[in-house]
Image (cartoon, grey):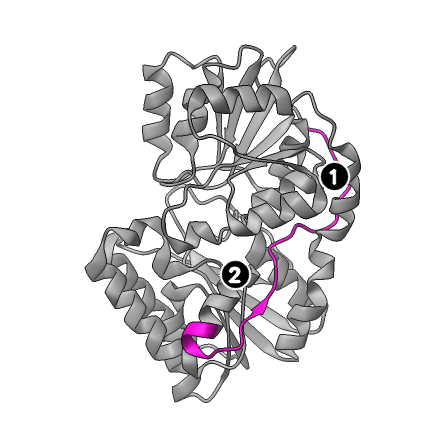
Amino acid sequence: MNKVIVSVSNDIFTDQRVEKVCNTLQNNGFEVTIIGRKLKNSKPIERKYKTRRIKLLFNKSFMFYLELNLRLFFILFFSKKDILLSNDLDTLLPNYLISIFQKKKIIYDSHELFTEVPELVYRPFTKKIWCNIEAFILPKLKNTYTVCNSIADYYNKKYGTNFKTIMNMPSKKKIELGQFSFDTKGKKIILYQGVLNVGRGLELIIETIRFLEDSILVIAGFGIYFKKLKAKVEELNLENKVHFLGKLSPKRLHKITPLANLGISLEEDVGLNYKYALPNKVFDYIQAEIPILVSDLKEMRKIVEKHKVGELVKSRTPVKLANQIELLLKKDFSSGLKIAKKELIWENQEEKLLEIFQ
């Protein structure tokens, strides 16, 4: 049985893509161990594969990445393995070095265009460091995959690589309905789920909700923008119209998503990473059979135009966006959603994933 060690820089708890990959591998004869981080607010996890969470002294800036990579290197060095799976550029260097020193096979999953994330766009020195690491390692890798065709094409053209596309789709599930802890009677529910970070259009939708009388905004997720967004809601006196759910487990989120009337993904065109964005929340909304409103960006545009499951944002000014949402909420996308949810599932990605590992 091949032993696979999976490396991530996050908490594991809410990373649905990594969980799906690990489950697929474990169910198909691989012995999986995942290594992630333990944070102050980390919640217990139970998985059918092995998990290991490391507590770091530093949780931001250069020292975080230095400590993470050093710790990963030594853990990987002394662990039994046949295959190394590195997730994103911030775990790639130690995995690559171990693969060379110990002659182990390495696979790389790029969840995003890391060097083009908004956090690096305005930090040229830091970006250059990551670009150098990427340029040094990627051309040497044979087994690579990413989340959408645009990012795969970008890497393949730039580095002469052979990235495959494994889309971040949800597993096929029956719709289960949970409940909110606040009153939603007579209200349309607009849902954002995912990381609260720069460039996600969250300030825009908070400003927009002011002009939607019979709607409330529910934000499920956590991130560095959490306090800033809470402060904005308080500043605009919108506490009764905007509700923060915080970090939810995938199981809990699965019961919350179908309660919404509209799912949003309003990423800004800031850097190539967002230009090529195809967030997993888009597929989660579709699986829950709720229509979507997404930014007019390449990969999300393809989903909307092909499957007829929602609309593209026409204007990023609050009043005009509110008008579009009001009209959208009156439309029926149920036919397109029912068809799309059968096609856009993880089970249709598994064969391609296993071909890479086998």
Up the image or down, 36 lies above or below 301; here it is below
Q: Position of residue 256 (x, y in %)?
A: 63, 31
Q: Main secondary structure of the magenta part?
A: loop
From what the image shows, is residue 343 above or below residue 109? above
Confirm whether the magenta stretch covers residue 64. no
Q: Identify the residue position indicated by label 2 in the image.
A: 150
Closer to viewer: mark 2 or mark 1: 2
Residue flagged by tag 2: what amino acid is it? Ser
Residue closest to the eye, 328 or 33: 328
> From what the image shows, is residue 141 above or below residue 24?
below
Quadrant in the rendering for residue 356: bottom right
Q: Is residue 15 above or below residue 248?
A: below
Q: Nearer the viewer, residue 148 or 82?
A: 148
Judged from the image, the secondary structure of the residue bearing numbered disc 1 is: helix
Q: Closer to the camera, 145 or 97?
A: 145
Circle 1 residues within 10 Å: few <14, some 14–19, many ≥20:
many
**SS at mark 2?**
helix
Instruction: Locate residue 137, reporting x and y percent.
Output: 38, 78
The verdict on residue 167 being magenta is yes
User: What is the span of residues highlighted in magenta in the rendered image?
Assistant: 157-178
